[in-house]
Amino acid sequence: MKRTKSDVLATLSRQKSTRIQTLFIALGSILLIFEVLHMFKNGIHSVSQEILYSSSANGLLDSKLVMEILEGRESPIRPIDALFQPRKRVEIERLPKRLLSGLNFTAIPSPGSKNGILKSANDAVEQGRRLWGELEGSGGGVEGNVSEKVEKCPSSVLITGEEFGRDGGVAVLPCGLTLGSHVTVVGRPVAGQFLVELQGLRTVEGEDPPRILHLNPRLDGDFSGAPVIELNTCYRMQWGEAQRCEGWRSEADQPTVDGFVQCEQWISDGKNEFPFAKEKLFVLTIKAGLQGFHVNVDGKHVTSFPYHTGFAIEDATGLYLHKHVDVLAIVAASLPTSHPSFAPQKHLELSDKWKAPPIPNKPVELFIGILSAGNHFAERMAVRKSWMQHKLIRSSNVVARFFVAMDKKREVNEEVKKEAEFFGDIVIVPYKDTYDLVVLKTVAICEYGVRTVSARHIMKGDDDTFVRVDAVIEAATAIKDGRSLYVGNMNYFHEPLRSGKWTVTYEEWPEQVYPPYANGPGYIISSDIAKAILSDFEKHELRLFKMEDVSMGMWVEKFNKTRPVEYVHSHNFCQFGCIEHYITAHYQSPRQMICLWQKLKLQGEPLCCNVR
């Protein structure tokens, strides 16, 4: 049958309409595919952030879904469905990044003739202002990789005894050690015992360097009554488990180090052939093996010491010998020619999953301010990857930030600024960092906690302190609402040390005892105390003292005269390391931080990691 002209036109019209509909469907499918690909490219976390800011009736998703997202469980249907729900009122929003502390440093009064800390503070603030100005003037942001400056170092070092004496008994190994490096000391003992130590560089002024290897030959013996060689490590004044060699060969079932026994025998047939004797020349060599250090004396193997977790041989940048040795020469060879003595790229994992979650625009229960030194890149990264991953922090119910002052090295400051811009969890306090002025960071924590975060409770911690966030919340909220509180490991009737390394002069502290104070590695105050501290600081009425934790005790004592404060003491805010049922664990190395977090996640209990 022959079709009419009108039939042909109608057919063409229907075909055109069908092609247009097909085109729109195809375009819609492509857009949907791009949406899904974008989601998987940026990870479910990037989706969950957006979901958290849109929401259900109360401004948040139901708790079960939020927990699934925060804990990283797969939830392939509901989050995607939530993307297409109508947008509702935003309850949580990302506030603009604020790198610099809002603390008003003009509030530090001009120093009086008898107040040394005020003069130090003003000088440090002026230097910090200059250092920050240089940093801002140099430009530079987070674009590109972290600096990869390579420090060139000699492959060998020769130091005479005279040079060693002039250098204060420390031989510098600029780029540390590597596998196969060896250090030889030629000398003679002049007393009953002496020390040989491989030490790390000072990480911040006022802090002892870590002892990566502590070798202590005791020629006159100790409590055992016979000559002994003791080996150990020490990190921030915390000693590890000592290895003692007393003249007997290690048992067959004791682990070896690169095939060498840990202790050789020097007692035979009733004769004690100790490797060292007073005024007798010795040649001692320490070699870095695959599993540990090997010590030879006069060409014979004497002892081997396995590496301890948390200590790296490349950080052994100094050889220290006690003055009880007459050193003739020191030779170090097979040394690395480059080393990340300053190398944030080694420690920082620039991944979005470690970035700080948003600050809520409503009050939070707890703000945690963490004191950190500029070049503590590894410590900060370990905190980010451990207890800062707690669900209360990831959900913004608890906020945590690092507080870092200006380092004397410009390159450190440049990297800290990049780190702060990338992770969004660093507050820079613009004064030149010194141990005696850590107290200024504590005031900055109070300012940030009450003005930026609006927290009910404020906690101060250190970057080597592991924090059980839920336990801290429990300790803070155990006190009746409305009460002022001060929680931590309290010290009562402590007296200032009037001699030694930590001397406090009568000019600095004329009183006989300190007020009650909580140990610095971890304590909590209520926000009203923090507000009072900040108010006194800005009115030039806040007394500053070089010991940060004593300062807080002093400020709380003053507040207590106008409004009663509930002092809460707990040994579980552990000052000296880690204990069972800890709330905080101090002196934890970066590897221990990760270990503690894994134990807490996998076993659900606060168990310690006792090896470094």
Image (cartoon, helix red, strand yellow):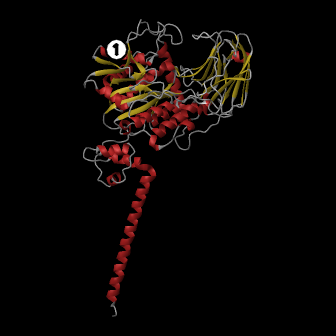
* Element type at mark 1: helix
Image quadrant in which you'd find residue 365 = top left
Is 525 above or below relative to 558?
Answer: below
Q: Position of residue 172 (x, y in %)?
A: 66, 24
Specify the amino acid type for callout 1. Glu
Identify which residue, 362 or 141, lies in the foreground.
Answer: 362
* Residue tagged 1: 557
Q: Position of residue 286 (x, y in %)?
A: 68, 25
Identify which residue, 21 or 179, lies in the foreground.
Answer: 179
Q: Residue furthest bottom?
A: 1
Image quadrant in which you'd find residue 153 = top right
Whether residue 340 is visible to the viewer of this picture, yes or no, is yes
Whether residue 90 is visible to the viewer of this picture, yes or no, is no
Q: Residue furthest front?
A: 269
How crowded pointer 1 is (Cα within 10 Å; few <14, some 14-19, many 20+) is rated as: some
Q: Position of residue 602 (x, y in %)?
A: 41, 37
The quarter of the picture where the N terminus appears is bottom left
Residue shown at 40% from the left, 11% from the top: 514
Q: Position of residue 225 (x, y in %)?
A: 60, 9
Residue shown at 36% from the left, 27% from the top: 458
Image quadrant in which you'd find residue 182 = top right
